[in-house]
Image: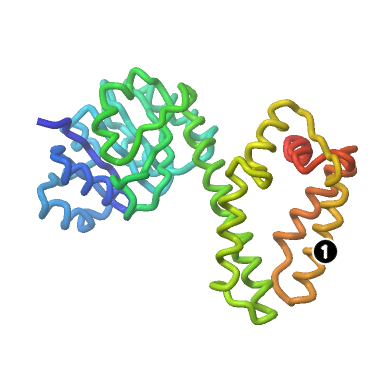
Amino acid sequence: MKTPVIVIGLGPMGAAMARTFLENGHPTTVWNRTPSKAAPLVKDGATLAPTAAEALAASELVVVSQTDYKAMYDSLDGADLKGRVIVNLSSGSPGELRRAGEWVSERGGALLTGGVMVPPPGIGQPGAYVFYSGPEGALEPHREALGELGDVTFVGEDPGLSMLYYQSQIYVFWSTLTAYMHAVALLGTAGVSAQEFRPFAASLLTELAGDGPMGFLNQLTEEMEAGVYPGADNTLRMQAVGADHVVEAAREAGIDAAGPTALRELFWRAVDAGHGTDGLSAVIEAVRRP
């Protein structure tokens, strides 16, 4: 028999996790503050617990997917967590996750925190992965079961690390796609469609991560690690002036300019800090010192 699993929280993500466990043969006990959400899962073989505390009797492995960490406190307050591995895949700040680790430990359990790097339909699908942090000894016995959700990527013992990784990844995701939206809106004011522009954006994103002359991801990584930011013929001051022009273009086109303005201000702050003759990677110094 495969490892029994408890899933607390049956929103879109929690329900997808519970279904994935069921489909992979794990006896699955579920609990949700709104019991009716469990009905489809119960029909397919899940066991609905009357309370979160009573659900804990079903397994050592407890997967929590709720709105926030306060919901975990509310759900498990007064419950005996002795011997339980609480795997909380909810979102929060890194500091909040560290405090939650202490809260669970005080009640006899071990907290593993996680950042899920796919939307609900991607749970259990190829390419899915989850950042985990917390006591590695608590993770290892359940690595196989948790692997049903996606590749298990353990990043360290600090409970806040998983969320730092998650939030770093999601920030790159959001900001990149939002920049693409801004570009589409800007070109759209001149009658250029998103489909016409898409191949150019796709090519740029591919090249940025490559090894060719446009492989800036590798280049910036090396420069930031070394703390050396060569400007050569493309200084940060030149790029800050270019950012001025992007803001002017957005304003002339009548589209939102908040994103380009924030970028321009970041560039100029790095220039004003003495990095005008350095390269783009010197912006990291302004990011580190707000």
Q: Is residue 236 visible?
A: yes
Q: Is residue 192 left or right of residue 120?
A: right
The residue pinned by badge 1 equals 245
Residue 178's image quarter? Answer: bottom right
Q: Is residue 208 left or right of residue 149?
A: right
For the point 56% across and 54% down, the residue is 174
Residue that lies at the very extreme toward the bottom in this rendered image: 191
In-front residue for pair 105/63: 63
Residue 130's image quarter? Answer: top left
Classify 179 as above or below 218: below
Residue 182's image quarter? Answer: bottom right
User: Which quadrant of the rendered structure holds the N terminus?
Assistant: top left
**Callout 1, which amino acid?**
His
Q: Is residue 135 left or right of residue 28?
A: right
Q: x%, y% of residue 204? A: 61, 55
Residue that lies at the very extreme toward the front in this rendered image: 212
Q: x%, y% of residue 69? A: 43, 40
For the point 58% across and 73% down, the residue is 196
For the point 32% across and 31% down, the residue is 86
In-front residue for pair 113/236: 236
For the point 20% across and 35% down, the residue is 5
Q: Is residue 109 visible?
A: no
Q: x%, y% of residue 132? A: 41, 31
Secondary structure of the residue carrying tag 1 is helix
